[in-house]
Structures are given as C-alpha cells and as structure tokens.
Image (tube, helix red, strand yellow):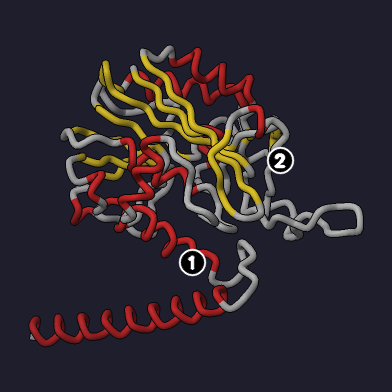
Amino acid sequence: MTGILGTAVNFKNSLRDIAFEQIRRRRLGVYLNSDRRPWTTGYWEFREESLEAAVQDADLLQRFRDGSDLPEGYGYRLDARIIEIPWILSRIGDSPGRLLDAGSALNHEFVLTSPALQQQKVTIITLTPEEKAFWQLGVSYVFGDLRQLDFRDELFDIIACISTIEHVGMDNSLYAADADIARRGDPTEFLSALSELRRVLRPGGTLFVTFPFGRYENHGWFQQFDASLVDQLVNSFGPRHFQESIFRYEPDGWHRTNRDDCADCEYFDVHESKQFKPQSAIDPPADYVAGERAVACLELQK
C-alpha cells in the first residue's frame, strides 16, 4: 500500500510541477511580447532566467572579475540582482571554505549549484523561512537578526551581504512577521550588523557587501547610501584590503562607472508609486529602471 500511495503522490507532484511550468512559460511569454516594463506580468520569470544565464556565463563572470565593461544591453530593465550576484560569484576563489549568505540573496538552486560555490559550505541567515529551501544541497538555514548573530567568532571565510545592509534598523515588516525584529529603529544600526559580520569573519576572510547607491534617501523600509555612508561603512570595518565597484543603470542597461557619476542617482520605489518617471515635452523619456539606478559593490578583507 505504501508503494502505491508513494507512486500516487509522485504522480500528483509531477502534474503540479507541469502545471507550474506551464504557468511560468505563459507569464514569461507575456513579458517577452510586451515592452518589458519592470514589475509587470512575467518580470520575475524573466529575471530568474536572466540570472541563471548570467551565473553560467564564464565570459561575463570574467568581465566582472577583471573590471571590464559589461556586454552591450546587459541587464536591460532588470534590477540590481543581475549585477550583485554575478559580481560576487566572480570574486569567490577556488579554495574550500565556509560562506555565510547574510540576507538569503543566494537562495536559488542555480546559484547554489554554480561552479563558484562548489567548494563552499553555505549557511544562509534570514529573518523568515524561505518558500524554497535546499537542504539536499547541504545548505544550512538560520533565522535571526544580523545585529545579534548566533555564531562563534571567526567562523566564516566569506560573507556575502547582498542588498541587505540598507534594511538594518529600518521597517522590515515586509520581510518579517516578528514585530520586535521588524521594528523600525535607528538607520545607523547597520553599523552594529557590520560589527557582527566582522566578528564572525576569520582574519584574512572577505566580506562582500552591496547596496543601492546615489543621493541619500530614506524610504522607511530601507535607506539608499551616499558617498558619506559608504565611507562610514568602510572606515568602521577597517579592512586590510578594500576594493569598490560602482554600476549604474542607463536606459540601455547596466554599465560600470564611478561614485561621482552616480552622486545624484534616485531610487524608483515601486512600493511608493506604480508610475515610472513621467514623460512630457520637457522631461526625457522614462528609463524604466526597476529600482536602484546605481549599486555599490564592496570587497572588504579583514
């Protein structure tokens, strides 16, 4: 009876997976046949496929690694994950080690199985359980607050903190049901999280941290860093070695650039407005940016 029931369950799951895949393909087709505006039907599916292609593109990862220009049209109308995840994967070496994903941005099967992570024992810390977990890949999941990490000193060789540090101390009710964790506190609390990340990083280990960059903006649920906050973060960490990469979104896609060219970049917050930049006889056409117009990617060695 157990065998029959198991076969029936597997068959039901297979039908469900087929149905989900059909829905995904249908939504993706809608997006590809549209003018590809962010956050419309099929955007998430297109974003997922684009990210998967990016992390498997050896030439692209080499461009990120050596500081070359990105391919023409790269990341067209996609948010900064298309920059942040490949950038970090391009900089992880071949040595075995322990990697902490502080924020769960790497929690995609195609990322966790990518060549860059094959030598890493991955631990993910996040505020709430993910819809999908990959224990079968040897990934460990911990739920907690970056300001008070339940890890011993100097445990990790690499820490990846992707578009997470800007949320620390802000209103995190979008991400956590726990009112105490989700509470809005002090925007400077990111320094407490930074101190904790440094504590659990071994000497010689590397923290990769990324966040929206441009003019300072407080959106309630996150803050966009300006040059002053970047300097504060770097000085507080006190790295032995420091490297900075800045990328900016233009109407044709993402480009490598510098701080000065992004000083006035504004964030498009889809939670505040569904309308992209108005078009008129005076204003330039909307660029249909998906969120941040610039992202800072920092490599900090302890």
The amino acid sitting under disc 1 is Phe
Could you say which is closer to the camera, residue 220 or residue 101?
Answer: 101
Q: Which residue: 38% across, 49% down?
A: 60
Whether residue 75 can be seen here: no
Q: Where is residue 298 in the image (x, y as percent from the top left)?
A: 46, 28
Residue highlighted by disc 2: 266
Of the 4 image quadrants, the one containing the C terminus is top left
**Labelled pair 2, 1 in contact (Cβ < 8 Å):** no
> On screen, 160 above or below 286?
above
Q: Residue at x 91, y 58 (%)?
A: 281
Query: Which residue is tagged 1?
Result: 46
Secondary-structure class at tag 1: helix
Whole-percent x and y of residue 119? 17, 41
Residue 204 at x, y = what percent? Answer: 27, 18
Mark 2 or mark 1, earlier in chain: 1
The image shows a total of numbered marks equal to 2
Q: Position of residue 52 (x, y in %)?
A: 37, 59
Crowd rating for badge 1 (residues with CA inside 10 Å; few <14, some 14–19, many 20+): many
Residue type indicated by callout 2: Glu
Residue 92 seen in render: yes
Residue toward you, 207 or 142: 207
